[in-house]
Amino acid sequence: MSRSFKQYRLTSLLLIHHVRDNSAHPAIEAAEGLRTRQFSARELVQAFLDRIANVDGTLKTYQTVLSESALNRADAVDQARSRGDEVPPFSGVPIAIKDNMCMRGAPTTCSSKFLENFIPPYDATVVEKLLEAGLIPIGKTNMDEFAMGSSTENSAFVTSANPWNVEMIPGGSSGGSAAAVSARLAPWALGSDTGGSIRQPAALCSVLGMKPTYGRVSRYGLVAFASSLDQIGPMTRTAKDAAALLGIISGLDLRDSTSIDAPVPDYLSELDQGVKGLVLGLPKEYLPEGLDPNMRAMVDDAIKALEPLGVTVREISLPHTPYAIATYYLICTAEASSNLARYDGVVYGHRHNDADSLIEMYMKTRSEGFGQEVKRRIMLGTYVLSAGYYDAYYRRAQRVRNLLKRDFETAFQDVDAVICPATPTPAFKRGEKADDPLQMYLSDVFTAPLNLAGLPGISIPGGFSGDGLPLGLQFIAPALSESLLLRLAHAFQSVTDHHLQAPPC
């Protein structure tokens, strides 16, 4: 096979705009091409690097592109295959990693000036698992600083753009990962989800984003925002790719005290079990008066697409949903205040060196190192935890959290899963809500309840608005029901083509 033909084959793989073949799964297809020697790992990695060079100047999805190490790893995979060594199925397939997951020898900035020059001496567990599976980290993606935001406008370095309309935000805080997968700058990526930071940008960029059950994926090496809420998950274009990636990163990790000791299913093999007989609950609280008509129409269309597959839908109530956002922003800010106390300029990270006292050094270091949104959340969380206010705010929020969890437990006695929008609106313009944090926080109104309850959720491409902007459909299921969510996503994608559409970039 000539090099020119190989390059054409790779270009076709990366730039699928109007494919209608449901077998077109980018990561799985790339792995098959590598296994059958249609192209080498170096050629595959180089093709993505070339596309990043051509497109990412506008989108700004990557914080760091790991060109040299990615090509070196690709060469090692090619050499192993040439020797006839047995390699894992996805060896040589590139992946993007959100820049709050530690990777030995690579910058991990959390998109913050505080960690601008931080290079971890160890790998996060998920990174270890990716490397063991032969995947090739191609870059660290842009994000809201310390994962605090819903638009990726809070990055200290660059503002990412939505590939479907560069004037719009890509969502957050995993906006770089979502935009990179959407724009074909990576076949798949990892994000983290504290209150919707995987599912919300996935919805706004027309990719699949999954928040696993709390504890299903190790948090060791994930820079902490809110420890009882954070969870790492896959961001892909299809349910098949998500099933494969989730299988790679899941499992017990003794270095994470919250890691769940439960068998990891073969998610890929369970995809084709179908959805006939499943009962989905449609919570009335997720379709309130005044909801963007695009979102309501998307849910109606999704139900019409699923019913012929044997799915039935009934209305349910999750009565404490109206209190979820307030509860979330009390708990997450309190935990952020505690977690970010370690950034004092003493051991690592940014330090102000022109101070007359230790206290002055602390104050100037943190004032310079943290952005506006991070400061806002630290101050709110410190207030919530302060003497005289702890019971009134934090303890009461934990009680409401239990009520939200019970709402879902009650609902799942009658339904197998929940169907609802992932976001209240399509993507909005950059800068539109930058000065209105309350409106920005409401972007997570349909995603944060899952984090409070520790449940798995998935956002999948559900269609497009009248303006051509992506809409995200969300499924929610009981704890450790990731297989069920992936089956629902796969079934929906088998009868729709939203996930096959590509942005104009």
Image (tube, rainbow, N blue to C red):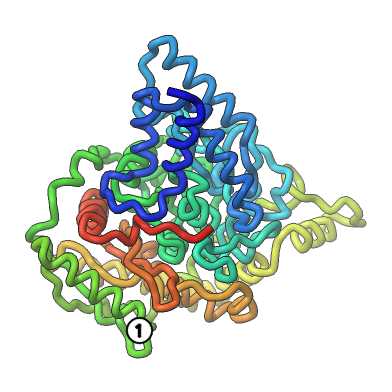
Q: Is residue 437 above or below residue 422?
A: below
Residue sticking out furthest to the bottom:
289
Q: 440 or 33, which is in the foreground? A: 33
Task: Report whether 262 appears left or right of 280.
Answer: right
Q: Quadrant of residue 465?
A: bottom left
Measuring 13% from the left and 47% from the top, which residue is drawn there? 273
Query: How many numbered circles does the render carry?
Result: 1
Measuring 88% from the left and 56% from the top, which residue is drawn there? 357
Q: Is residue 26 above or below residue 203?
A: above
For label 1, count other residues whose C-alpha is less than 10 Å away and answer few (under 14), some (14-19) or many (20+).
few
Residue sticking out furthest to the top:
83
Measuring 26% from the left and 49% from the top, which residue is drawn there? 22
Residue 29 appears at what percent x and percent y?
35, 37
Mark 1 residue element: helix
For label 1, the residue is 293
Residue 384 appears at what percent x and percent y?
56, 72
Which quadrant: the N terminus? top left
Q: Quadrant of residue 248?
A: top left
Q: 358 or 101, which is in the foreground? A: 101
Q: Is residue 481 visible?
A: no
Q: 37 or 95, which is in the foreground? A: 37
Task: Report whether 296 appears left or right of 108.
Answer: left
Q: Amino acid at mark 1?
A: Pro
Q: Is residue 75 above or below residue 244?
A: above
